[in-house]
Image (cartoon, rainbow, N blue to C red):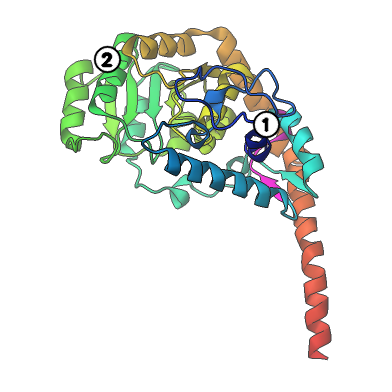
Amino acid sequence: LAYMSVPRLVELGELPFPPGGDLDEPVRGVPGMEGFLRRRDLPSPCRHHGANNNDDAAALLGRLADAAVHCSKARALILNTAASLEAPALAHIAPRMRDVFAVGPLHAMSPAPAAATSLWRADDGCMAWLDCQADRSVVYVSLGSLTVISPEQFTEFLSGLVAAGNPFLWVLRPDMVTARRRHADLQESVTAAAGDSKARVVGWAPQRDVLRHRAVGCFLTHAGWNSTLEAAVEGVPTVCWPFFTDQQINSRFVGGVWRTGLDMKDVCDAAVVARMVREAMESGEIRASAQSVARQLRRDVAEGGSSAMELKRLVGFIGELATPIQHAKSESEV
């Protein structure tokens, strides 16, 4: 909904945001999100980046607005979400489109292995390590397949995780930390700071299996939509450190709407990491919200649930679209 509103926000003068402005300032002009949507919740092209790269930022914002216009002209919009997660937004999107289908979370409907869609090969050995940990004692850390962090940010995350005091499983891709630090050196840094028994580092993990494991107590994530949905389906509390694109607003929904976790915004500080991890691990309120959302999503994808019914409607819709094509083909062959 926020992305589809970008052309109007440009017309209203809400975009791009002024340089140095308050990123927590509310954004006006998005129906259904008034008083909720903040500047920081929109992607970085919406920000005025100063004279040095002003042209690039303007071009990116223009492409974002064009994409929103094209989206609104589509015959239908298929969304990997559930009505229970985003009912108000879906209600405002529906009048703009001829058809909208909320058919998610799709991964919860399909038994297909996550490895089939992964960009990296998962290290399944981490599952044996999890088997040795106590229930809900482990912090799972993964910032996705594209996020990159500086050596300084790596140190802040590591210090915060160690200070939080819980064992942690950390996905550190070989290309994740800038300045070309060797992956082995990163692993050694983690082991030296936390100890062998308190930390496990892998290049990639079988995330869905990890999130449903009894030992995982919370998920420190970049708040990508797939990761957000996977955590929601398993009822795992999340600590969100959004990196780019839709991750800011996903993080906002986790912390401010569903209340299934906490939003770090763009702060990378050891004390904040430690505090939020502890809160996510210990808060009964957050865990109860996360489990409530998980139960609802399971109902949504089950037979007769809202997402299951929407998927059936989508199949029928596609069949209706195909019928005139097949009819025309048959006539041409006569």
* Residue 307 in sight from this viewpoint: yes
Q: Secondary structure at mark 1?
A: loop
- Report, in whole angstroms, how far the alpha carbon at label 1 lies from the one at label 2: 43 Å
Side (left or right) of 164 relative to 250: left
Q: Which residue is mark 2?
A: 159
Label 1, residues with CA under 10 Å away: few <14, some 14-19, many ≥20: few
Side (left or right) of 193 relative to 114: left
Q: Is residue 190 magenta?
A: no
Q: Please provide percent x and percent y for residue 175.
A: 27, 41
78 is higher (above) or lower (below) than 156: below
Q: Please provide percent x and percent y for residue 324.
A: 82, 71
In the picture, the quarter occupied by the C terminus is bottom right
The amino acid sitting under disc 1 is Leu
Q: Please provide percent x and percent y for residue 222.
A: 44, 30
60 is higher (above) or lower (below) than 195: below
Q: Please provide percent x and percent y for residue 287.
A: 56, 15
The amino acid sitting under disc 2 is Ser
Query: What is the number of the mark on residue 12?
Result: 1
